[in-house]
Image (tube, rainbow, N blue to C red):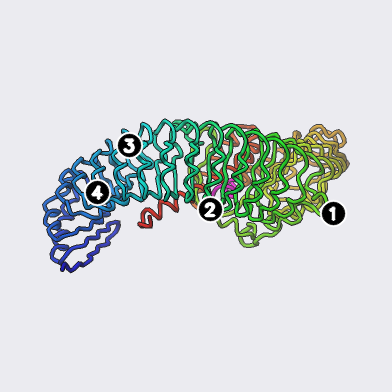
């Protein structure tokens, strides 16, 4: 009986693990490794794991001397892991001789050329990972012969052609990741045969056609990401079209469903309400129409709901009040009408909502029906408490965003790292809300952006707004507000964007450090307003235009800090990430157009959703690196 011994060496970035019959063989192998430093196929910081079924293979390996083309001599090889090295060249066809190979991992290298058809001979293979390389050509149909394969990862290569129908023969497959390639054609209906399937990643390709109804047979599917790539327009993107099949409701295990930025049509299927395990539903900008089905209110595990930028009509279902775990809600840029139901008071976990550019009406933010006298945001505890040490909401949601996101501004794509705080915003602009602004909104002290512009609001600006100690942007323009500007607002040292344009306000503009930075446009079309910077003075207004200009120059650093805080709160933390943040600030200021703020708010919600998705992808990659799949 062969006695196995594991020998390990860990020095700097080098990791080397081997299973052999004797220490002498392991020592000899280390001598062989030392000869690899100048070999063309390997880097000096080799991370290498190999396992053999017999001691004879050690002798064969010692004679191999890093010539990848001679790998076919190792016919008893069981486990080969060459991930995260600098391996160059192509995968040799001789690899088809390793008939005992069970695990082959060569991801994160510099392999090019095509995937050899001979890989189809490796009938013992259970895991195949060739992602993060430069492989091209088509996916060989011979992969469909690997009946024992449970994991197939070919992500982030340059593969083209269609997804082979033969993939549907892999009945043991649990994860398929073909994302970020150049694949075209339709999604094969044969994927519906994969009864053990749990993870499907086809995003960032050039797939087209309808979502096949056969996908609904995947009762064990947990994650399905089929979305288009939204950032790098030089990369092809999925263009799936047609309706979402009603059969999707049969996928009872589904937790994450993302189809955003495809060209779908028709309504949201009512059967999605049967996916009771669903945590993320992302249908952003998919051209869907019709009403939002009330059945979505059955998704009691839902954390993130993204339906913005579609053609949805009707009212927001009152059943949404059942979504007690909902944290982010995006319904903006649709044609939704009617009042917000009083059941929204039940959404105590809601931290970010995006409802702008609809036709919602009624008295803003008030609970209706039987809950008289209460206000919609009175129960949003996540927006009403703050951790004094971190200036973040005490609600635990902010911990989920400690990750990286991709940011695009003026055509520049950047990765901003380490998000350390949650960016809390309420945007109800471009609707038909009427009535008074509730004083209770002044209790939402974690707010950074509040946009109520372009509605029909009346009455006074609540003095309680002076409690919004973190607010950076306050837009109340294009309403029918009257009375004076509360002097309490002048104490908001973080306020950097303030817009009261086109209201019926009167009286003296409060004086304060921040108010010295606001220009005439902030107060335009309020005939009763007086004081600096307007030409109508208040008797005690002694601030001159010269002093104003000096104040603006003195506060230029403060303006930069504001913009930096916006991206810090929304996208990044402190440290090296601030260098990127300052670059973004310069680009924004150089436009000279303060409409950038509306664009930030509009895109911010989806950016945070992308941050969650990126975190999930990083978690998958971590599992791959640690052999958990």
Element marked by disc 4? loop
Q: Position of residue 248 (x, y in %)?
A: 54, 43
Q: Earlier in the sequence, mark 3 or mark 2?
A: 3
Specify the label residue 574 is tagged with.
2
Q: Earlier in the sequence, mark 3 or mark 4?
A: 4
How far apart marks 4 and 1 lie (CA) works out to: 70 Å
Q: Position of residue 536 (x, y in %)?
A: 85, 34
> In front: mark 2 or mark 1?
1
How far apart marks 2 and 1 lie (CA) works out to: 42 Å
Residue under label 4, please give it: 43
Q: Position of residue 162 (x, y in %)?
A: 38, 33
Residue under label 1, please give it: 373
273 displayed left or right of 51: right
Q: Residue at x 64, y 59 (%)?
A: 395
- Quadrant where the C terminus lies? bottom left
Q: Position of residue 109 (x, y in %)?
A: 30, 45
Element marked by disc 1? loop
- Of residues 548 and 54, the one drawn nearer to the viewer in this rendering: 54
Q: Earlier in the sequence, mark 2 or mark 1?
A: 1
In the rendered view, tell whether residue 184 sits above or below residue 57: above
Magenta stretch encompasses residue 572: yes
């Amino acid at each position: 009986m062969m006695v196995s011994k594991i020998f390990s060496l860990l020095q700097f970035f080098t990791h080397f693990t081997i299973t052999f019959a004797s220490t002498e063989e392991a020592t000899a192998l280390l001598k062989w490794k030392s000869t690899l430093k100048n070999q063309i196929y390997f880097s000096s910081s080799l991370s290498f794991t190999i396992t053999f079924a017999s001691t004879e293979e050690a002798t064969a390996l010692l004679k191999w001397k890093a010539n990848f083309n001679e790998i076919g001599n190792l016919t008893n090889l069981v486990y080969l892991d060459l991930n995260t090295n600098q391996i160059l060249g192509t995968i040799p066809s001789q690899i088809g001789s390793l008939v005992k190979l069970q695990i082959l991992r060569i991801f994160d290298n510099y392999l090019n050329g095509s995937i050899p058809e001979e890989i189809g001979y490796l009938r013992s293979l259970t895991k195949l990972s060739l992602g993060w390389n430069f492989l091209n050509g088509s996916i060989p149909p011979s992969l469909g012969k690997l009946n024992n394969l449970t994991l197939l990862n070919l992500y982030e290569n340059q593969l083209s052609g269609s997804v082979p129908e033969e993939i549907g023969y892999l009945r043991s497959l649990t994860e398929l990741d073909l994302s970020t390639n150049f694949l075209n054609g339709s999604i094969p209906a044969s994927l519906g045969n994969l009864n053990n399937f749990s993870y499907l990643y086809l995003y960032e390709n050039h797939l087209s056609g309808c979502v096949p109804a056969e996908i609904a047979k995947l009762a064990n599917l947990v994650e399905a990401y089929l979305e288009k790539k939204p950032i790098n327009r030089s990369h092809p993107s999925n263009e799936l079209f047609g309706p979402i099949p009603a059969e999707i409701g049969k996928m009872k295990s589904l937790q994450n469903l993302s189809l955003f930025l495809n060209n779908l049509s028709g309504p949201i299927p009512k059967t999605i309400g049967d996916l009771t395990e669903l945590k993320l539903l992302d249908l952003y900008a998919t051209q869907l129409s019709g009403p939002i089905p009330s059945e979505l209110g059955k998704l009691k595990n839902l954390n993130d709901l993204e339906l913005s930028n579609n053609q949805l009509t009707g009212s927001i279902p009152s059943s949404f009040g059942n979504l007690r775990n909902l944290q982010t809600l995006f319904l903006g840029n649709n044609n939704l009408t009617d009042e917000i139901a009083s059941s929204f008071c039940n959404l105590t976990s809601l931290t970010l909502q995006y409802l702008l550019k609809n036709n919602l009406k009624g008295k803003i933010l008030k609970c209706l029906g039987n809950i008289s006298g209460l206000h919609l945001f009175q129960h949003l505890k996540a927006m009403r408490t703050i951790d004094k040490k971190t200036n973040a909401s005490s609600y635990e949601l902010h911990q989920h965003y400690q990750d990286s996101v991709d940011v695009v501004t003026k055509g520049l794509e950047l990765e901003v790292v380490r998000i350390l705080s949650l960016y809390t915003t309420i945007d109800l602009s471009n609707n038909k809300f009427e009535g008074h602004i509730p004083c209770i909104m002044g209790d939402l002290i974690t707010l950074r952006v509040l946009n109520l512009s372009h509605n029909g609001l009346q009455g006074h600006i609540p003095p309680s707004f002076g409690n919004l100690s973190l607010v950076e942007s306050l837009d109340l323009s294009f309403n029918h507000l009257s009375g004076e500007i509360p002097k309490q607002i002048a104490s908001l040292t973080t306020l950097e964007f303030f817009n009261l344009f086109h209201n019926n306000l009167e009286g003296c503009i409060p004086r304060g450090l921040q108010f010295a930075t606001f220009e005439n446009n902030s107060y335009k079309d309020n005939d009763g307003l007086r004081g600096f910077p307007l030409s109508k003075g208040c008797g005690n207004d002694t601030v001159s235009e010269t002093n104003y200009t000096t104040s603006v120059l003195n506060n230029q650093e403060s303006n930069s800090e504001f913009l930096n805080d916006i991206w810090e709160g929304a996208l990044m933390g402190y440290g090296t990430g601030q260098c990127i943040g300052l670059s973004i600030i310069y680009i924004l200021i150089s436009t000279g157009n303060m409409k950038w703020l509306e664009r930030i708010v509009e895109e911010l919600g989806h950016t945070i959703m992308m941050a969650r998705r990126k975190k999930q992808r990083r978690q998958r990659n971590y599992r791959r690196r640690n052999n958990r799949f």
